[in-house]
Amino acid sequence: MSVHEQFAEDLALYALGALAGPEKEALEQHLEVCSPCQSELRQLQSDATLLALSATGPVPPPRSRERLLRAIARERRAPVTVPKRSVWWLLAPYAVSAGLIVVAGFLWNQSRSLNRTLANLRERHSAMEKQLRVAQDLVNTLTSPESKQITLAPVKALPQPQGKAYYLSSSGHLILLANNLAPLPPGKVYELWLIPSTGSPIPAGLFQPDSRGTATVVNPPLPVGVEAKAFAITIEPTGGSPAPTSQPIMLGAAG
Amino acid sequence: MMADTTAVPSDAGLVSAIASGDESAMGQLYDRYSAVVYSIALRVLGDVGMAEDLLQEVFMQLWRNPMAFDSSRGALAPWLVAVTRHRAIDWLRKRRPETPVADVALSFEPDLASKTEFARSVGKIRAMLDRMPPTQRDVLEMAYFEGLTHSEIAARTGQPLGTVKTRIRSGLLTLRTALTP
């Protein structure tokens, strides 16, 4: 069974309505995101129904039926029709929007400080959207079937540095993950190069390894649509070079 | 099970007839389920008069708001059972009605519209309960019919909380097998 074991007993209690307090809240939160537990709950509710049915046997007196039918005759009503409901629901968003506009206008006039808060929120919202786009680009570059993976290996037998570049030419996005890089002497920096099918190497970012020798380059400024023949890493003076000034220490052909 | 459905209107069909104000459909639905609703109300409340009142309330609720039952989410019988039990516990504990039974979507095999099939199913469920150790049956019934929480059950029976939880779960899982062929 794929049900999360820690919730299994609480689910049974919950199905009987016997769970209370923080355990109930924790389970309800978990249920919102866990479909195996949702389906187990439905099954347990069904089991609880069996328990209910064990009580069947007694039959209500005939007067109960008459009482009900008299009561509904008193509450005779127009049919509940679906179209009425759907028209209402179609109008609801407009009503809500109109309401929001009125409220927004009211707030706008009420207080400049509220306006400032609103502006801040918008700023944060757009910053978050931007972060989201960056994250989407990252994921896309890593997972797109069009994305080329290039492993960069050391040119000479140095202590096993390795780099992995993910490159999506259609959008010009590039990610380099490197590790076991040797520390650099002062005044030097690693520079990544995109070597196009034709033309000179294009600078694709500067980086310094951290204390563990790992480094990343994420989305350096690159022209869009350049077909890569290879990627290379050279050691350059701090600030980088517009064209390589040394032999590459790592190189990987774009397959 | 299939044989009945051609001659007898389905539950969902009756509910939509009720939605369009058909009083005779209400009568048919009452004939089909009043005994189940009444039995559960009586089992929980232990009082004939209160059980009749609750029976009235449950069916009036369906008459006033038939759309509260959504046939796409499950069958009517388990929905009625859950609504009845919920209201009965509310009455028993003299609580204000809690939020309506929101999401009772159940898979439910026995066809309550067929009386023989239903009686056979109830017989199997009772036999299964009778075979259970009394300590296990008691905790299940305290939770379901008396509306006690797990800690209240532990306090009343003197069983450790963990034991109550385990017994309730394994009891339900045992019941599950009652209707499997």
Image (spheres, coloured by chain):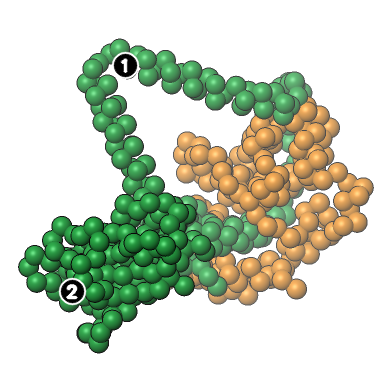
Chain colours: A green, B orange
Q: Residue at x 70, y 23 (%)?
A: A84
Q: Residue at x 76, y 38 (%)?
A: B15
Crowd band around label 2 with a 10 angstrom C-alpha radius: few (<14), some (14–19), many (20+): few
Mark 1 falls within which chain? A
Identify the residue under disc 2: A212
Q: Are marks 1 and 2 in contact (CB under 8 Å)?
A: no
Question: Residue flagged by tag 2: what amino acid is it?
Answer: Arg
Q: Position of residue B40 (x, y in %)?
A: 64, 50
Q: Quadrant of residue B67?
A: top right
Mark 2 falls within which chain? A
Looking at the image, residue A186 lies above or below residue B90: below
Q: Residue at x 47, y 36 (%)?
A: B96
Looking at the image, residue B20 lies above or below residue A219: above
Q: Is residue A69 visible?
A: no
Q: Position of residue A187 (x, y in %)?
A: 8, 65
**Residue A214 horizontal side relative to residue B25, left or right:** left
Helix, strand or loop at disc 2? Answer: loop
Helix, strand or loop at disc 1? Answer: helix
Q: Quadrant of residue A109?
A: top left
User: Which numbered circle lies on residue A108?
Assistant: 1
User: Which numbered circle lies on residue B50?
Assistant: none
**Residue A175 horizontal side relative to residue A146, left or right:** left
Q: Position of residue B145 (x, y in %)?
A: 55, 54
Q: Nearer the viewer, mark 1 or mark 2?
A: 2
Q: Tell me the distance, in whole angstroms, between the alpha carbons under discs 1 and 2.
A: 53 Å
Crowd band around label 1 with a 10 angstrom C-alpha radius: few (<14), some (14–19), many (20+): some
